[in-house]
Amino acid sequence: MPVRGWIEVSEKYCKGCELCVSACPQKVMSLDMEHLTPKGYHPARLSADGCTGCAICAIVCPEAAIAVYREIPARRARAVAA
Amino acid sequence: MPVRGWIEVSEKYCKGCELCVSACPQKVMSLDMEHLTPKGYHPARLSADGCTGCAICAIVCPEAAIAVYREIPARRARAVAA
Amino acid sequence: MATNFPAELVYQRPESFTEALTHYCPGCTHGVAHRLVAEVLDEMGLREKTIGVAPVGCAVFAYNYFDCDFVEAAHGRAPAMATGIKRMLPDRVVFTYQGDGDLASIGMAEIVHAAARGENISVIFINNANYGMTGGQMAPTTLPGQKTTSSPYGRDVEQMGFPIRTAEMLATLDGAGYVVRRSLHDPKNIRQAKKAIHLAFEAQVRGLGFSMVELLSTCPTNWGLTPVEALHWVEERMIPFFPLGDYKIAPALEELRIR
Amino acid sequence: MATNFPAELVYQRPESFTEALTHYCPGCTHGVAHRLVAEVLDEMGLREKTIGVAPVGCAVFAYNYFDCDFVEAAHGRAPAMATGIKRMLPDRVVFTYQGDGDLASIGMAEIVHAAARGENISVIFINNANYGMTGGQMAPTTLPGQKTTSSPYGRDVEQMGFPIRTAEMLATLDGAGYVVRRSLHDPKNIRQAKKAIHLAFEAQVRGLGFSMVELLSTCPTNWGLTPVEALHWVEERMIPFFPLGDYKIAPALEELRIR
Amino acid sequence: MTRKLLKGNEAIAEAAIRAGVEGYFGYPITPQTEALEYFSRRMPELGRAFLQAESEVAAINMLYGAACTGARVMTSSSSPGVSLMMEGISYIAGTEVPIVLVDVMRGGPGLGNIAPSQGDYNQIVHGGGHGDYFPIVLAPASVQEAIDLTVLAFDLAEKYRSIVFVLVDGNIGQMMEPAELPPMQPVKRSNPDWAVTGAQGRERRILSSIYLNPEDEEVVNLRLLKRWQPIEANEIRYKEYDLEDADIVVTGFGTAGRVSLSAVRQARAEGIRVGLFRPVTLNPFPYARIKELAERVQSMLVVEMNTGQMLDDVMRAVAGKVPVEFYGRLGGTVPFPDEVLDEVHRLAERPEPPNGNPRASWMERLAAAEK
Amino acid sequence: MTRKLLKGNEAIAEAAIRAGVEGYFGYPITPQTEALEYFSRRMPELGRAFLQAESEVAAINMLYGAACTGARVMTSSSSPGVSLMMEGISYIAGTEVPIVLVDVMRGGPGLGNIAPSQGDYNQIVHGGGHGDYFPIVLAPASVQEAIDLTVLAFDLAEKYRSIVFVLVDGNIGQMMEPAELPPMQPVKRSNPDWAVTGAQGRERRILSSIYLNPEDEEVVNLRLLKRWQPIEANEIRYKEYDLEDADIVVTGFGTAGRVSLSAVRQARAEGIRVGLFRPVTLNPFPYARIKELAERVQSMLVVEMNTGQMLDDVMRAVAGKVPVEFYGRLGGTVPFPDEVLDEVHRLAERPEPPNGNPRASWMERLAAAEK
Amino acid sequence: MPGIPMPFPAAWGCGGYKVLHQVIVRKSLEQTMQTEIVIAGFGGQGILFAGQVLAYAAMDAGNVVTWIPSYGPEMRGGTANCTVIVADEEIGSPLVRNPKGVIALNLPSFDKYEPLVVAGGTLIVNGSLVNRDVVRRDIRSAIIPANELAESLGDKRLATIILVGALLVHLPVLPHEAIEQALTDHLPERHRKLLPLNFEALRTGADFVRKELAAKAV
Amino acid sequence: MPGIPMPFPAAWGCGGYKVLHQVIVRKSLEQTMQTEIVIAGFGGQGILFAGQVLAYAAMDAGNVVTWIPSYGPEMRGGTANCTVIVADEEIGSPLVRNPKGVIALNLPSFDKYEPLVVAGGTLIVNGSLVNRDVVRRDIRSAIIPANELAESLGDKRLATIILVGALLVHLPVLPHEAIEQALTDHLPERHRKLLPLNFEALRTGADFVRKELAAKAV
Ligand SMILES: Cc1ncc(C[n+]2csc(CCOP(=O)(O)OP(=O)(O)O)c2C)c(N)n1
Ligand SMILES: Cc1ncc(C[n+]2csc(CCOP(=O)(O)OP(=O)(O)O)c2C)c(N)n1
Ligand code: SF4
Ligand code: SF4
Ligand code: SF4
Ligand code: SF4
Ligand code: SF4
Ligand code: SF4
Ligand SMILES: [Mg+2]
Ligand SMILES: [Mg+2]
């Protein structure tokens, strides 16, 4: 099973440019056409399962709008918890 | 016998820099230490026999002060005369 | 998106950024270049000893986005201004961030001489094949045939001249310690760009002379393309003319490996 | 010196010269460069269609010596001024004559862009490793360690930067049609310099773009050497740093042979 | 001919083209870029020279070279770009070749902003370049005037072998108004007897600004000064509105003049005897006319979009005869007519004694208002 | 301390060094080069920064950067080089960082010559760069004054975050006179609270001249103007010679002032009641003092090595109260005292009515003399 | 244009501005008329073009007219507005503090201009983008759901023209025909096919206001 | 130096020019004294240095002094001259039209300055480089074969100092000892060994003139 991850897109920064959407290797992102940011853009969001936390979306984002989280593999998680 | 030639150094232009003197392959030039040009330089002159009219002195002269003449080989001279 | 597994933060907005939202057009890779610089400052721990020099160009407000000291130069003169700063504060890290109009057109003398002097500064050079800020005029980097608002019939190299390959040109100078070209059009290239920026600052910290990273960058607005199309334009049109590569690497840097 | 044999004139002062005596110091090879240009104008029959652009530098009065139309540019801006003239009068021959301070220091942006544009002008570039006219300050071409009035302890490349090899740098530009370096330190090299000047004008007449001949030249006065010693200094000190050679030759020129 | 709705910057460019400009050299800068872009479209179409230079320094020196050939040539820029041209401008003045330069002023100093301003008055009018020289400066206040004065600029430049500036604030450049363009003139190279064109069948010619012997340079300086005398005598231009019976004169150029016009009209509607004097030539400056006015009115108000640069010239003309007051907006802000109207009200209510330092009293009023 | 025989240019350089200058950036140009060369020797000796820039454009922008760090820095140049610095100067003014700039004026316009001149007065005093700004301008007339005013220049620059020009003609730069140098000051970085030095343990700082919002730029413009008020109130400097009982005032700065001093002395010896007023600060200009003088004397004579640039300022101060006359030499020529004396004789013999255009009457006299 | 001819030979002339001095005599006040209209919103709403259409129409109707844009401090995507002045004599200031008519296309513009409209003037608001009512009672005003109306016409870019139609009901400085003609003459080639829709938008806006007025009248 | 102190805190001061306004009161005329000396010739004759020697000597003797060079329009190898003014109060113009003393080292300088020397002044000419006599009778003058004298002393660069020695006989503005001290203090290190020769040159020039005077007196 691949690593699991998720992202948070900041509504403050996102300008809906779709660079992340197009770069995401898992194709799990899309623009939220229902919603406008305070600056009037449709923000990007995680719109399907399958995010691996690979951070590629963050690497291409010109607005540093994305924070990426990744599952801590069980073994390390235990170590960390210890 | 080598070609014979001679040069004329213009007193107006010569600044006595000795570049010609040092470049002349026949070493037949020198500065005229007895004499000053209107601008106050000792001019270069042909000071010995053996000029071949090779024009090297003229090629190195920064003041375009030298005119060079060369003997017309007998055969051509005749042709010219004809 | 809620999760129920233990997780760690693998990427977040760099600390060397302020909270300001950029004024860049959506999808413009100026933003990516900024982010990479900020990440490198974070990683190298340089924020508090760095002084940035902003250009005149779309990046004129760069100083709003970096949480370090900054000055704003006259058009093209960022390398001179950076020189003045560096000479007064040799132990600080000084970098300029310049567009192609700024650096390769009006500022050509200043960049050549900063490089020739081996001025110990780092230059982030954004090549987007036009003058973004003033509305898309021809730049020294505009491709042959490319239409801009001041080459409306396409750049006619006979009349308007040939584009300048700046990195190649500056690499001929002895003072240049690190001169490379990278691109911002995809994740792989972005990663390499970041390594290059890291090396550029590394070169400065080690006193190896002038360093410059030329970055191929998009200008969706003036190119009349969507942000994603613009990335393809970089790949398909710009890279063939402006080959990516290392044009000058000081020997002392060659050993260095940046993860 | 009287002779009694039939003789012919094999060399005389070129017709493209006026009668004026130059203001150059005795033995300064600026004069040789002038003479070569005048000879080439004579040989190519260009005097009446040529417009020269004088620099600010020792050659500021070049216009007094050539019997053709001339303008006098601001320091370093001769290529821009020549561009303005050439664009208005494309069928005239336009050349600049510039020193190394003029061309490679203050005028760096203008020369790079004239070359990049492939501006159809010819540039005679006198590299004498200092600022002659203002009394021998450091130039971008001053050799490492060389003492000048503004590098009194010798050029310290760490502080003052490295000399610029201008021909090599400009040769990287696509607009450059003919870029070479020659020297004026002995008869053989002078002859080759003249051929190069001929080719540069030839390139212009054929519309092959920017042409430049860099000439290593002496400044006995500020070097503190006799004229003859100065020639040796060129040979021994300058040529090793500024190698003579052809750095860019447009294919159309390669075939051409100048006697 | 019919009038068209034209944008100031483009109207200037088209006017120049119709006046037969043969070469344009420039560098993009807001708020002037539309002119450059317009030239980039039209000049190649007409087979004339357009070149985007690498910088303003290069542009002015290209222009310098081009002008030396005797061709009609021009450039345009905005404040920081014009500052970079100062050396070249001084060279051109010293070489006595004609050029036209359009400065579309923006807020400064420094990078400032791209809003309309009049902060370059001194730089343009009183010599921002080194040495003594006397450029003609034309200040249009509408798109039509911008057109007419651009055409005139070429005529004057060539007639007097002079630099002619067309000095507009960003408003004039960005504004659209109906205007009439002149008919297209054929390009005619006048081949003046000083132009360098290649010494074919004639003596060679030299164009230079170097006169190493101070006595020679003094002759040149005097020649420039003497050439200036007929210009001062014959080329002063201005517009007067409602001045016949005015007690108060408002004066301002360009946009400041227009804004003042609105205020003057309003004040007239209120019965205040006020008129507007709008200089069209800033150099030569209408000293004599202002002096005449100063003899017969009760006070003057100078309105500018700067800290009072023209004010100094007005004061020199008025020479203490009547009180002069100043109202300025700075850094790219444009006054509204009501602000000027307030000043007119103040002057109408209590005319003050001659004021030696109008800038200081304006600042006092500002400070008082802040409290 | 003992006096030494010092050359103006070198004295200025050494004075700056003793005042603790930490960085010098410049480009060679006659007649200023000795200063640059002097710095190239002394600064490395002292471990301070000397850099020969690639051009004056680069020099002023290096200076700009260096000034942003809060260090004492300066440059020097001569007329054409100063023209190239105009954009940078305007940026520095807009950013409100202190610099000292020495202009050793030469004959112009254009390339001109290397002889002493005062043709840059307007460029330096009235804003050769774009936008509104107010530099302090100091005009020494001797080597000792050049030293003292150079030291003062740094103090004023830092006190007011201002540009300070030391404006000398080539004569002052080339002349040798005995003079006393100040003691060597230790370099002390004052670390002002605006300087960019790296945001270590503090909020980051930004230095910029861009204020995209005109209202913000207006605030900056007003701040500059307000800062100028105490300068006008406190920093005006001048020297007066023999003015107590004078009927005629001769005025001139720098070399023109010195030449006038000789003429004044000679005229006094002849019994003419004449004195000399020599402005030391050209900006702020001693308007008030000249106005006072104008109240009590019979005429004024302005002597300059230009076409009458300071003349305009004197006229504004005099405001028509007494006749003002002008005498100028141009393009690098320096008047001899007897020329000024002739003018004084003329004024003493037949005082004329207030003269609205002294430049014009001067030219008439010139023309008459030519015949 | 009256004036003193240039003092140099005709050879120098090229049809330019030869007037030396000009003395302009004021019309009597009753004769003068000036209307100022501000259109304000953000970039991309067709604001500058709508203003130009008004200007063209006014010009063709023989008026004196000025059109002037003003950008906010943000360069792009920021506020955009323009001022059009229609008059019958030389126009002084191209900008006024208190315009007779305002079209506010978003909330910031609404907030900014509501207090500025001259008493008795007209304020037209794009109701689709604001969430409050007009407060002032001394002006004529209308809040119009322009985006919705535009989308119902089939193209949301028509919102601004709808509002122009509305404005002209309250401020009848130009007849609809003049606007239609200006649209016909100046709509960019690539939008030509939208011409009929534009006409309809004008009418839609006008009708909306007329209906409202009628409703109020009842 | 009298004057009003600077109005800002001492912290700002660094020993500089703090004087705001200064009023200078003239000495009475009898008290004043000013001597102007021009040395003129071409570059390379040591003219500027000779002038500096005079200036140093004058300074050390407690005088006010100025030294100013002026170059001809030719940059190098052209004319060179300098003016030295010695006075006892602030010096006005550093250049004068009619100097009290002139040393002319070549023909052009001789031609230029002979008419300019003030009546009663002194003109010393390098006879080695001129081919005519002094015409004026209202000045003191001497023509001295300085080059020959210098060569006989062993170094032709001494010609100018010889002429200085000569000048000071007619224009005794400074004693020989002062000049000797100035030479001792300021002759460049590399010419140090020439110091005694320089002293002799001074005397040689003076003696030449004194002998001439004596001859005339006879
Ligand atoms: C002296 C001067 N000239 C021109 C300008 C106008 N100007 C501002 S930005 C710019 C070009 C910017 O292009 P580039 O450097 O390529 O940056 P980009 O916007 O493309 O990132 C120009 C010409 C200016 N501000 N100052
Ligand atoms: C703007 C400007 N800066 C500086 C100068 C002074 N200047 C005159 S010539 C020169 C340098 C000339 O050196 P180079 O170009 O090498 O010519 P060379 O005399 O050596 O032949 C300089 C700096 C000037 N005239 N104008
Ligand atoms: S982290 Fe990777 S997989 Fe997840 S959204 Fe971003 S790019 Fe897609
Ligand atoms: S790349 Fe960034 S700015 Fe663009 S859509 Fe994705 S999150 Fe938003
Ligand atoms: S022509 Fe040749 S041989 Fe004759 S003098 Fe000249 S260099 Fe010597
Ligand atoms: S090279 Fe020319 S200038 Fe030099 S000495 Fe020979 S002839 Fe004279
Ligand atoms: S104009 Fe171009 S370069 Fe500038 S922010 Fe927009 S997309 Fe980026
Ligand atoms: S100074 Fe040097 S370059 Fe200039 S003329 Fe003399 S020797 Fe030649
Ligand atoms: Mg760009
Ligand atoms: Mg050189």
Image: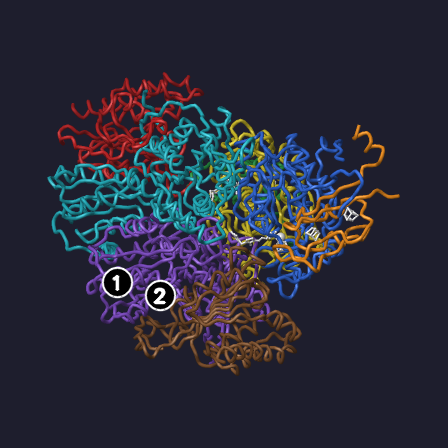
Chain colours: A green, B orange, C yellow, D blue, E cyan, F purple, G red, H brown
Residue at mark 1: C-beta within 8 A of ligand 2: no
SS at mark 1? helix
Where in the figure is residue H7, as x and y percent of width and height?
A: 32, 72
Q: Residue at x 14, y 54 (%)?
A: E352
Numbered mark located on residue F280 in the image: 2
**Both marks 2 and 1 on one chain:** yes
Report in which chain the residue with disc 1 lies. F
Looking at the image, which is closer to me, F240 or C39?
F240
Instruction: Count how many numbered circles sit on residues in the image.
Output: 2
Residue underneath mark 1: F290
SS at mark 2? loop
**Image position of E257 (left or right of H140):** left
Q: Residue at x 51, y 70 (%)?
A: H124
Residue F16 visible? The answer is no
**Image position of H130 (left or right of G170):** right
**Image position of C24 (left or right of D140):** left
**Image position of C172 (left or right of G213):** right
